[in-house]
Amino acid sequence: MKIKFPLLIITALLILGSCSKSGPSNPLTPATTVPVLAGTSVASAITGTSALSGGTVSSDGGTGVTARGVCWSSTANPTTANTITADGTGSGSFTSNITGLTAGTLYYVRSYATNIVGTSYGAAISFTTTATTAPVIGGTTPVTGISDVTALSGGSITSDGGTAITARGVCWNTSSNPTTSNSKTIDGSGTGSFISNLTGLTASTIYYARTYATNTIGTTYGPEINFTTFLAIGSVFQGGKLTYILAAGDAGYDPNTVHGLITTASDVTTGANTWLGNGSYSVTGAIGTAIGTGNANTNTIVTMQGPGNYAAKLCADLVLNGYSDWYLPSKNELNKIFLNKALLGGVFSIFIYWSSSEYNFSDAWVQLFGSGQQTNTSKTNGGQIRAVRSF
């Protein structure tokens, strides 16, 4: 026997079955989306190779932001497939340091943020990097603190030309228009003022100097200045050590030109040599004792005594540091060496040094460099020798 259900009951049962299969929906589970970016920061601090930008992540899309920053390119609509910064995670604002740019170039930039759903981008901005030039130099500082071998100068760099200054300082030479191929100081980097210590100079010499600064474009030079180093007793000068500067009353003194005596930096020989050259006493006539008479004395002695290894001949034959006009000092010239020996440096014997000044047929003037005493002694005795030359 078949049982018949009313149509209304069958419809109700179908509805109940359908509800039990799908189950009720959960209104508390939110849908996740890509992050939301409020925008891309306007570029600032623009140079030839860098700039600042950034952005703000206003919503993480319902799941954590795992990467954020800016991306850029020289074409529109850059993506993370282009060059990017990585500026942390999460929501909020961030600053991006854009580097490695090319000077004078238009760039497009936009912020980005990434979560598990995907990556979203902020509005695009654009900017042009500064065109890079060589540095701009404000000037070369007038030289001060001049001595015989040192001086002070410096300069100022007013612009780096849009890229970092890698070297700066002062270069100098004894001819005009010095470059960094000549002598130079290295005084840090960047713009601004600096002081340069010029060393290794030569006394009584004219030098030309100018500021320089270098960046990736090249090297710029400032205006040229010149200065003259001083003469100082003990300076390395013209083949030896400056010993004496002529004063009024000295033979050869010129108020408009500096003249004086230069001494060898060490004794001419390491042993003791005699004044006598020909083996027998004689009057040579080399009787000058004043400053300026030593050269004439030496020539007279050598002419009279001829060849040999005696004091005057050893000096006359000396060729040292490119100079061949050395001679045995007169009595007063020898005394200037003694008086200034502490400034001259080197090693001096405490025993006698020969002068070229003859005392009589058997004796010549000497000076004890231990006490400073000037006396006469036999021409056959052994003595030390320092050669001098005039300038």
Image (cartoon, rainbow, N blue to C red):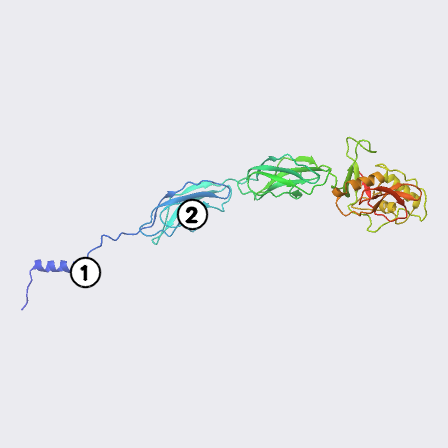
Asked if disc 1 and disc 2 are in contact, CB closer than 8 Å, the reply is: no
Image quadrant containing the N terminus = bottom left
Q: Which quadrant of the view contains residue 9?
A: bottom left
137 left or right of 367? left
Give coordinates of residue 274: x percent, y percent. Answer: 88, 48
177 left or right of 95? right
Residue 100: give its label: none
The number of numbered badges drawn on the structure is 2
Write the residue at 10% across / 60% down. 10
In the foreground, 287 or 153: 287
Give coordinates of residue 284: x percent, y percent. Answer: 93, 42
Image quadrant containing the C terminus = top right
State the CA–CA distance, disc 1 to disc 2.
49 Å
Secondary structure at badge 1 equals: helix
Which residue type carries mark 1? Lys
Which residue type carries mark 2? Cys
Give coordinates of residue 55: x percent, y percent. Answer: 39, 44
Labels 1 and 2: the sequence-earlier one:
1
In the foreground, 186 or 175: 186
**On screen, 260 above or below 349?**
above
Q: Which quadrant of the view contains residue 331?
A: top right
In the foreground, 318 or 63: 318
Q: Which residue is mark 2?
A: 71
Give coordinates of residue 245: x percent, y percent. Answer: 78, 36
Residue 21: give its label: 1
